[in-house]
Amino acid sequence: MARQSISFTEPNDEWLKSQVDNQEYSSKSELVNDLVRQARKQQAQVDWIRTKLEKAEKSGFTKDGKDEILNQSKALFNG
């Protein structure tokens, strides 16, 4: 596993410490890795939605606008 040295603002560091102190995570590293995983998953969802929007716009298959397609996609992801 790659080791990194990063700096946090005081409020962010305090929040990280509180998550570890509350035993939500065993370490700051575990928490930061979880946050990165969540951000990567969110980016994958955004990329998927963007691809679907572009495909729909180019196909002429739907009369739905971007906002309608986006809302439908969000509904699919959120259950």
Image (tube, rainbow, N blue to C red):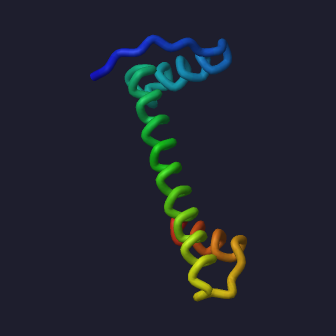
Q: Nearer the viewer, residue 11 or 39?
A: 39
Image position of 5 with respect to 47: above or below: above
Report which quarter residue 18 is drawn in.
top right
Q: Residue 49, position in %: x, y?
A: 55, 64
Horizontal relation, residue 67 to residue 21: left or right: right
Residue 22 or 34: which is nearer the viewer? 34
Decide: is 25 above or below 7.
below
Query: Residue 62: x, y in percent?
Result: 62, 87
User: Looking at the image, which is closer to me, 17 or 65?
Assistant: 65
**Outermost residue toward the front?**
58
Measured as percent of width and height from the top left, residue 4 is found at 41, 15
Q: Residue at x 45, y 11 (%)?
A: 5
- Tally of numbered discs: 0
At 66% from the left edge and 12% from the top edge, which residue is drawn? 10
Residue 8 on image: x %, y %: 59, 15
Q: Is residue 71 above or below residue 34?
A: below
User: Which residue is farthest left?
Assistant: 1
Q: Which quadrant holds the N terminus?
A: top left
Q: Residue at x 46, y 44 (%)?
A: 40
